Amino acid sequence: MTPLVALKAARDVDQPAFISLLDEDRVQSTSDGPLAGIPFAVKDNIDIAGVPTTGGCPARDTPATETAFAVQRLLDRGAVPIGKTNLDQFATGLVGTRSPYGACHSVFSPAHVSGGSSSGSAVAVALGVVPFALGTDTAGSGRVPAAFNGLVGVKPTRGLVSTRGLLPACPSLDCITTLTRTVAGARPVLDALVAFDEADPWSRPAPALLPPGVARRMRVIAVPDGPLDLDPEHETAWQEALAHAARVGHVVRVDVTPFLAAARLLYEAAFVAERLAAFGHLLDGPGVDPTVRSIVRGADRYSGADVFAGLHELARLRRLAERAFTGADALLLPVTPGHPTLAEVAADPVGVNTRLGTFTNMANLLDLCAVAVPAGSRADGLPFGVQLLAPAFADGPLLDLAARWTGETVAPPATRTLLAVAGAHLSGQPANSDLVRLGGVLHSRARTGPGHRVYTVDGPFPRPGLLHTGDGPAGGIELEVWDLPEAAIGALLPTIAPPLHLGPLTLDDGSTVLGFVADTSCADPARDITAYGGWRAYLSS
């Protein structure tokens, strides 16, 4: 698809996906870079020089003087913007209807909302007008329209993509995001977008190594330990998604209460005051959506003390939410509880929108990265989307997991020496610092293959002994696989006290790695802790 063909297709779209289109003389590649000649669309709260950045408000008709840092990164690699897309005004909404330019709808149903606030960007990609589009995601504005249009929506870690040149909604939380039809389609775009921008106070450089506790290969997926409040059609699709998760990786159940409580803070506490600080001066001008005005003006009732009370509560919830990732790589949640119609939003614009943010509002508050991916269809034919969430800077491994979810090919990561640990060397346990000191990084969370049992053993500190007895549980025993420099194995050997030693260990995926194993002298029934499923669970008991 050439940029000119995309421009023509954009003119023919039968719903208000675009607010403005560029002139034909601007729709041409100026570089032979890796994205040369690829057309894309830009949400109209992100600057392109010479084009007004309306933010969904027609009164903002002055052309931008500079191009946003993120857009310029794409231009430098040859990508070609063709126009600016519709949005919930000032990026305040998850429905895609709060725009004087008209309401977008899902490409799967004219009766159902497209989702917002990146409504037009999602429609442009879902209709095939462009291969990718930029959106933003402060509270779910990139993930919700992705889910409602059968797309992949990538919300990077806050600060990985510069927001300089973005009309702010909540500057401390805003993220520029991508909407594509596949995970593979998002990768080269994100490679171009991710860069430290010293002129952006919210920019953060990507770390050279993955943070502690983040695996290079994500295999353990956390899911809620109880039912969720979902519409019936969504509930059925969610159960199918849970079954799919068990095929993609190993599933563990976690308490998601802290995540849901943090999500409520965004609009039900003083955090909404950041929107008032960011664009409150625009609310009294012409063309402002009354719902947007009432939501943001509602922040007037909060005091400075309320802001700090909210920050303290968020810190408490963040600490609780971190526990979900102790033994898991990513958290799986639906993107939304349901898919409302345009009529339902018109009847209750605030209530319906609030419910849509149940599972998305907390991602940036808790400093998570996220990818929304398609998860089949509901019984009524509408697309169903789920999201994978992980700690900050886990973007690369999370994209690989998202690709495996969608059935796309993932290149295996390069490895050095893999070592399986099941006790004191696990993340957060006393001897884990030895692995880190030796240059180790967490490769993956895993389980043993069937037939293993685990026993407590004597030694300088509490530790388990893994033994293949042939009669262990089919589901295996919890462990972690660490990627170490070859020299590290030699450095570890003197620290391993009998009856433990290093030997071959078969994992649940059929592969064999070096691991901490015990000799047969450990097989004392009185010390058998296999029923706990792993060392952490035993310690917790």
Image: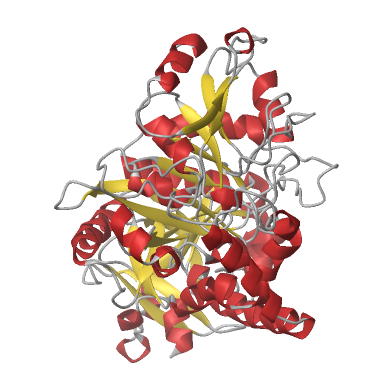
Residue at 47% across / 69% down in the picture?
327
Question: Residue reaching furthest front?
Answer: 286
Name the residue located 49 percent from the left edge and 49 percent from the top edge. 398
Pick the front one: 167 or 349: 349
- In the image, taking residue 231 as reference, residue 85 lies left or right, namely right
Could you say where residue 82 lies in the image, as x and y percent from the top left?
Answer: 55, 21
Q: In the rendered image, is residue 217 in sight?
A: no
458 sits to left or right of 236: right
Residue 49's place in the image compared with 202, above or below, is: above
Task: Residue at the far left: name it.
Answer: 379
Q: Where does residue 212 sit, x and y in percent of width and height? A: 64, 60
Q: Nearer the viewer, residue 53 or 42?
A: 53
Q: Quadrant of the C terminus?
A: bottom left
Vertical placement of 434 versus 45: above or below?
Answer: below
Residue 184, given in percent of the width and then of the height, sits at 44, 31
**Residue at screen point 38% across, 40% down:** 151
Judging from the image, the colouring scheme is: secondary structure
Q: In which quadrant is the N terminus drawn?
A: top left
Q: In which quarter of the image is residue 343?
A: bottom left
Q: Nearer the viewer, residue 444 or 164?
A: 164
Do we see residue 172 in this rendering? yes
Nearer the observer, 335 or 511: 335
In the displayed structure image, the side of residue 338 where residue 516 appears, left or right: right
Q: In which quarter of the image is residue 334?
A: bottom left
| Residue 214 location (% of width, % of height) | 57, 57
Tag count in the figure?
A: 0
Residue 360 lies left or right of residue 393; in this view the side is left
Image height check: is 17 above or below 533? above
